[in-house]
């Protein structure tokens, strides 16, 4: 006969009456489990992209580009390289091939580039893309004879016409020809301003102040800069890698990035000039490393008239290679190949972007979805089950006897959250978090937009988990919003923590107390006498302990 367990002994010692009474209570079937939380809603696209055009017909077309010297005195090195180079002529394939070679970029991939820029750089709303061209479509696409293509960087080699072979010649290049008079004629938006109203007669196309700054001012160094405001339209040039390196996805968010050692040259009529851009720099201690920030290029100052076409030529030291060895390789792209994007863009300030994302103003591309309070509470229960562990060493009979008690314990569990924004350390107004974030803690939307308006290494990182999150992946939490609506006036830097139970009820916790202790400390007598034999007074040290 087995010895009775400790729980059985405790029951006998405590009396048989309780055990009999517990067994006498009729037990019905257990309640059905509550349905899981609804899937997180997606952002509403107000301006979805059009269907992509068919792929072009494969062809080859050898072409050449002439580049001026990089770093010829007294001009600095424009490519960010450690060493300059002499003028050169490079040859490249201007055609289209299914393996990703050639400078022509099919419309499907080019449209994806525009969507990536809209997603990760919402402060520049794309109004009109320039520089695309019409070529013959794939013969299998009988519905259309012509299709549209963009431009991407492709491998290049020194031309035989350039004389001696350069030791440090460019590895890739691209060229975009923009026929401004034809772009104006075929555009549907050049007569309208940022609000959609018709421009007055004689106004500049697209409402752009060609050849000048929108709102000029001088900084502390006396350099003239532009104080952009919502609605200002500029000619913006950006590049985007068609295939991101796995290491790069962990270091920075997706978005504009110049190829390594980018050298830009603008041709208008018969005159050509080298353009200065803010880009990564080659490191002297490791020539293979390029570090720094990449800023978009505002080409509006250089293009003074829309009556003259211009050509933008680019060469770089980025090596274009096969991407088949990478797991997430995009079909039809090569590693190191970049899309060259030239567009009329409209600036949106953070506060105005906030109104558009919340649906309070017109003109936005997306609106942020909101999780209802009911759905948020269901998500909270699932979050509790993942974050808490219940240790139970009792036997089966104890579990049956204490099922009701365990249910009460389950509902009484609580976790602590903060109602302060993790970015600004002030009370939140619009709590949001990333769709793919594993936490419930939120941050403030307006602070998040202000913190990411400038290019930085930590751009678009979540203020809680530091994962990359864009505005289209944000969700507005109804649970945190309900807590802020009821407790917002009481939230401060000294009292921001809230105790949130699994059933969705909350309670604002007491103030964060600071314990001040003054402890007297006297130096030893031999130390006191070392400086003249006198006695030094005791030194009071204040210790602040945060609990």
Image: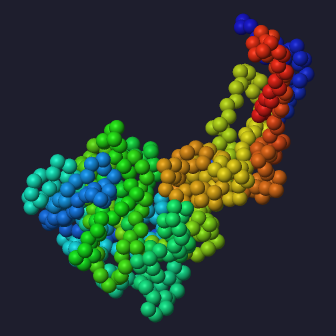
Where does the image place residue 14, in percent across and percent down from the top left? Answer: 89, 17
Q: Which residue is located at x 40 percent, y 65 percent?
A: 297
Examine the rendered structure and indicate whether residue 358 appears above or below residue 409. below
113 w.r.t. 384: above or below: below
Viewed as shown, does residue 321 lie left or right of 416? Answer: left
Q: Is residue 369 above or below residue 467?
A: below
Q: From the viewer's perspective, is 151 left or right of 383?
A: left
- Asked if one can make out residue 304 in the rendered structure from this viewpoint, the answer is yes
Left or right placement of residue 243 versus residue 480 in this view: left
Point out the image quarter for the N terminus. top right
Say which residue appears at 73% left-offset and 53% top-offset. 427
Which quadrant, please, contains the C terminus? Answer: top right
Q: Is residue 104 left or right of residue 352?
A: left
Residue 92: percent from left, percent from top = 17, 60
Q: Which residue is rendered at x = 48% and y = 65% of the image?
A: 223
Residue at the spot 51% in from the left edge and 65% down from the top edge: 222
Q: Residue furthest top?
A: 1
**Residue 477 seen anywhere in this rendered image of the structure:** no
The foreground one among 479 and 238 is: 238
Residue located farthest toward the front when viewing the structure as drawn: 532
Q: Nearer the viewer, residue 302 or 472?
A: 302
Q: Position of residue 368 (x, y in %)?
A: 59, 62
Image quarter for residue 143?
bottom left
Give percent across and percent down for residue 545: 78, 31
User: Total marks drawn?
Assistant: 0
């Amino acid at each position: 006969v087995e010895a009775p367990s400790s729980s059985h002994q405790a029951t006998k010692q405590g009396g048989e009456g309780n055990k009999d009474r517990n067994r006498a209570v009729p037990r019905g079937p257990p309640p059905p489990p509550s349905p899981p939380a609804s899937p997180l809603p997606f952002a509403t696209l107000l301006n979805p992209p059009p269907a992509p055009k068919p792929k072009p017909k494969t062809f080859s077309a050898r072409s050449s580009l002439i580049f001026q010297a990089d770093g010829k005195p007294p001009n600095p090195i424009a490519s960010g390289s450690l060493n300059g180079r002499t003028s050169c002529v490079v040859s490249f394939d201007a055609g289209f091939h299914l393996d990703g070679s050639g400078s022509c970029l099919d419309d499907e991939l080019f449209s994806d580039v525009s969507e990536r820029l809209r997603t990760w750089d919402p402060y520049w709303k794309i109004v009109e893309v320039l520089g695309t061209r019409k070529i013959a479509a794939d013969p299998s696409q009988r519905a259309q004879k012509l299709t549209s293509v963009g431009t991407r960087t492709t491998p290049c080699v020194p031309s035989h016409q350039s004389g001696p072979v350069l030791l440090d010649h460019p590895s890739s290049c691209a060229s975009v020809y923009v026929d401004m008079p034809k772009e104006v004629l075929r555009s549907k938006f050049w007569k309208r301003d940022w609000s959609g109203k018709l421009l007055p007669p004689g106004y500049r196309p697209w409402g752009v102040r060609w050849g000048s700054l929108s709102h000029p001012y001088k900084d502390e160094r006396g350099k003239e800069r532009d104080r952009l405001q919502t609605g200002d339209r500029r000619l913006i040039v950006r590049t985007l890698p068609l295939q991101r390196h796995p290491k790069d996805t962990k270091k920075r968010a997706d978005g504009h990035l110049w190829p390594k050692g980018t050298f830009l040259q603008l041709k208008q009529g018969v005159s050509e000039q080298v353009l200065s851009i803010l880009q990564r720099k080659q490191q002297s201690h490791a020539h293979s490393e390029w570090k720094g920030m990449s800023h978009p290029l505002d080409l509006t100052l250089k293009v003074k008239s829309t009556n003259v076409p211009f050509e933008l030529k680019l060469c770089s030291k980025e090596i274009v290679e096969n991407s088949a060895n990478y797991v997430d390789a995009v079909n039809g792209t090569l590693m190191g190949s970049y899309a060259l994007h030239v567009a009329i863009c409209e600036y949106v300030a953070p506060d105005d972007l906030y109104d558009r994302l919340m649906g309070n103003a017109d003109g936005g591309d997306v609106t942020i979805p909101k999780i209802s309070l009911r759905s948020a509470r269901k998500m909270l229960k699932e979050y509790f089950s993942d974050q808490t562990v219940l240790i139970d060493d009792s036997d089966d009979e104890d579990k049956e006897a204490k099922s009701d008690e365990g249910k009460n314990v389950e509902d009484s569990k609580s976790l602590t959250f903060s109602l302060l924004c993790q970015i600004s350390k002030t009370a939140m107004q619009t709590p949001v978090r990333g769709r793919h974030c594993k936490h419930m803690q939120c941050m403030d939307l307006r602070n998040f937009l202000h913190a990411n308006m400038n290019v930085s290494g930590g751009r678009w990182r979540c203020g809680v988990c530091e994962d990359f999150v864009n505005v289209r992946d944000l969700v507005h939490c109804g649970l945190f919003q309900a807590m802020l609506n009821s407790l917002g006036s009481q939230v401060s830097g000294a009292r921001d923590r809230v105790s949130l139970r699994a059933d969705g009820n909350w309670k604002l916790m007491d103030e964060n107390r600071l314990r001040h202790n003054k402890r007297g400390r006297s130096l030893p007598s031999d130390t006191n006498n070392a400086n003249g034999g006198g006695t030094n007074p005791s030194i009071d040290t204040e210790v602040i302990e945060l609990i």
